[in-house]
Image (tube, rainbow, N blue to C red):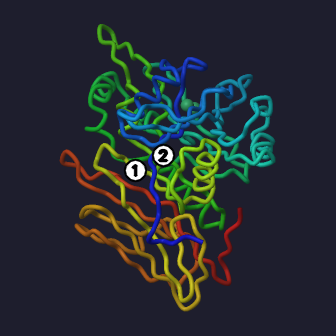
Amino acid sequence: MFNILHLHEYVGNLHMHTPYSDGEASHAQIAQAALQAGLDFVLVTDHNILVQGVEGYYGSEDSGYVLLMTGEEIHDQGRLPQVNHLLVYGVEKELAQCAHDPQHLIDAVNAAGGLSFLAHPHDQVIEWRNEYAIPWVDWQVSRYTGLEIWNYMSSVKELMPTPISTIRTAFRPEEYMIGPNPKTLELWDSLLTKGWRVVGIGNADAHGTTYHLGPVSHVVYPYDFLFNCVNTHVLLPQPLTGNLEHDKFAIYRALRMGNAFISYDLLGDAHTFRYSATGTSSATIMGGTIKLGPGVTLQAKVPIRCHLKMIHQGKVVAEVQDRENITFTAHTGGAYRVEVWTEYKGKERMWILSNPIYIEDATYRVVG
Ligand SMILES: [Zn+2]
Ligand SMILES: [Zn+2]
C-alpha cells in the first residue's frame, strides 16, 4: 500500500540504441549523457539483441550516479516493410527468436516475468526522404504491459513532411513539437474504456544519427539533448538503494503498475507532479485501482500554474486554466487520466501526461 504523500520520484528514459544495433554512442557514453541531462536511470533497447554484462550504476561521487539497465526492442526482421517494434524490459534472456508472431512474443515476455510496450505505434512515413514508417499493425494482440504513448523521434518524423520543414525541425524541434500523436492517445483511451490496464510511457528513441540534407549535415539529435525532452518519471514507495537487483525490480514494478507519468522536460521541470484518488476508505496514485462507492475524489497538482484536463473515456470531464490543482469527484467507473498543457514559445504544448487511475464499479472492471 502506498503512502500517497511520501513517494520517491525518479526520472529516466526507456528507449535508446548503441552500436550493438543502429545507435552511435556506447553504453558508457549514454550513461555520461544521462548524467549531464540529470536522469536517474536509462534503459538501453538495442534492436533484437539483449546486451548483457553492462548493467549497473555509472558515474562518480562528483558527477553523481545513473542506473543503466538493458532491455531490447524486438521485431520480426524477416517481415518487410518493418512493423511491430516491441520494447521488452525485465527479461534476462534473449527473446528475439519469438518475433515471428507478436502475440507469441508478448506471451513469452509475460512467461519470463517481463514487461512489453508497443513502440511508436502510429509511426509515420517521410515520403520525400523515402523513410518508411514503422507502426504497430497487428492490433489483435493483447496482454502487453502498455503503449509508448510518446516517442520523441517518431514525433519529430511527423514534423518533416517537406524538405523545408525537415531543416527547420532538425535545428529547432522544440519550436514545432506540440505533443504525442493524437491517434495514440485515442487508442489508449479506447483500450482503457474496455477495461484494459494499459500503462503509458514516453521516450527518446535516441540513436545519435546524423541527417544529411544536401550541404547540411546535422546530428538529429544528440543523446543529451533527447534526455532533456520526453522522459518517464516513476514513483516508488521506497527510495532506490544503489543495489542493482533491488533497484531494477523497484523500477520495473512501478512501470508494470503504471505508477509513472510522462513529461516533456524541455518545457519545465515536472518533478513533484502528483495525481491521486481518495475514496471513503482507501486512496491510490496513478496506475492504481479504487472502488467507486459513493464517489471518489481525484486530484492532480503541478509545480507551476498550467492548463489541466481530466480525461475519461476520451472526453474532457474537468478542465482548469492557470491553476496548480485540479480536482474532480467521479460518480462513474472507468479510467481517468490527466493531461497538463503549458505555453512555450507562444504555443500551448503537452507537458505532462499521467497514467490513469482505474475506478471500479458494477460495470467497470480493470483486467491485466
Ligand atoms: Zn523502433
Ligand atoms: Zn528504437
According to the image, label 1 marks what residue? 263
Is 238 placed above or below 301 here?
above
Number of marks in the rendered image: 2
Q: For this view, does 86 lie left or right of residue 8?
A: right
Indicate the position of residue 175 as horizontal and vertical percent values.
25, 38
> Which quadrant: the N terminus?
bottom right
* Residue furthest front as drawn: 61
Task: Give 226 or 314, whichever is nearer the viewer.
Answer: 226
Which residue is at a point 49% across and 24% down the rendered structure image?
Answer: 28
Viewer-side residue, 251 vs 324: 251
Query: In the picture provided, is 312 more to the left or to the right than 323?
Result: right
Q: Residue 101 carries which label?
A: none
Mark 1 residue type:
Ser
Sequence-wise, the earlier of marks 1 and 2 is 2
Most foreground residue, 204 or 171: 204
User: Is 170 left or right of 142, judged from the image as shown?
Assistant: left
Secondary structure at numbered mark 2: strand
- Determine if the C-beta at disc 2 is less than 8 A from ligand 2: no
Q: Where is residue 57 in the image (x, y as percent from the top left)?
A: 52, 35
**Cα–Cα span, label 1 and label 2:** 7 Å
For the residue pair 354 and 128, the one nearer the viewer reads as 354
Quarter of the figure that contains the C terminus: bottom right
**Tag 1–tag 2 contact (CB < 8 Å):** yes
Quadrant in the rendering for residue 288: bottom right
The residue at which mark 2 appears reads as 202
Residue at x-position 35% and y-position 39%: 228
Which amino acid does the dot numbered 2 rest on?
Gly
